[in-house]
Image (spheres, grey):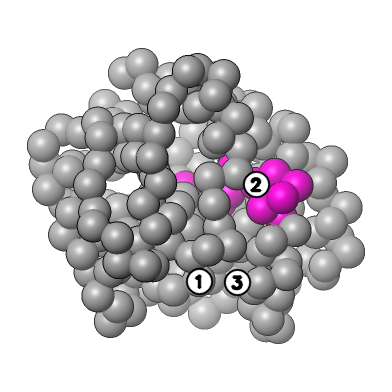
Amino acid sequence: MTIWQNVPFEDEAAIKEWANKNNIKYSVIKCYENEPLYADDLLIVLGGSMSAYDDIDFIKKEIDFLENHIKEGKKGFGICLGAQLIAKALKAEVYSSKTREIGWREIEVFPHILTSNLKPKQMVFHWHGDTFDLPKNTIRLASNDAFINQAFATKNGFVVGTQFHFETNGGSLKSILKEDSEYLNFDSPYIQNIEEIKEGKKYIKETNRALFDLLDVWKNL
């Protein structure tokens, strides 16, 4: 398995726990340091503070790579920015939503092979302001009142993207609050304050369990 990391303060978090439990060896490519891109059959693309439409060399390279990776029938899982990069690789429009969703908020989960073990209503962690149109030949997996396209997947489940962060754990939550707290300075009804976000640590076990359930299905497809 290969993991693409787009900023220093957003790492694999709970994905590491899942990989260790499943004896899955993985490598991390620091895309922000322009390390050469490669991917195993399982590829996870993490989040970042930039946008999929930014004029950044390594972002463009990721999109081009993802387009070929998907065409070759390999598996890709994108989180937040990673989901937006996959959407763009699938020729969907990615753009600013003019609002932001930050903190612990519920999503509605829709039926799909990947979500077969998830609850219909799921609490997850959000840290995003960009959105995307649903890519052609994909299925919407989740939605809420802030963003209609919270998650999507191809029909066979090989390619999946989530706007939200299933992988958030105590360490990654602390890191993003420290390194990207200015992102909270925005007028939106979907933003929690820092104390509310910290109180949401009680949801970490639940959200990580949902991630593990989804990844278990994904890797075995």
Kindly report which numbered mark, 3 or 1, lies closer to the viewer in this rendering. 1
* Marks 3 and 1 in Cβ contact (< 8 Å): no
Give the magenta range. Answer: 160-173
Amino acid type at mark 1: Ser
Percent coordinates x, y for residue 83 in the rendering: 39, 53
Residue at left 24%, top 54%?
Answer: 37
- Residue 143 visible (yes or no): no
Question: Looking at this view, is 212 or 156 the one in front?
Answer: 212
Figure quadrant of residue 87? bottom left
Relative to 41, residue 68 above or below: below
**SS under mark 1:** loop
What amino acid is found at the position of numbered circle 3 in the picture?
Answer: Arg
First along the sequence among labels 2 and 1: 1
- Does the rendering let one see residue 198? yes
SS for dot 3: strand
Quadrant where the N terminus is found in the figure: top left
Q: Is residue 114 above or below residue 43?
A: above
The residues bearing labels 2 and 1 have C-alpha atoms spaced at a distance of 16 Å
Tag 3 residue: 100
Horizontal and vertical percent position of residue 101:
63, 65
Amino acid type at mark 2 = Thr
Q: CA distance from mark 2 to mark 3?
A: 18 Å
In reply to whether residue 212 is colored magenta, the answer given is: no
Q: Which mark is residue 168?
A: 2
Disc 1 crowd, CA 10 A, few/some/many (<14, 14-19, 20+) = some
Residue depth check, mark 2 versus mark 3: number of the one nearer the observer: 2
Q: CA distance from mark 3 to mark 1?
A: 13 Å
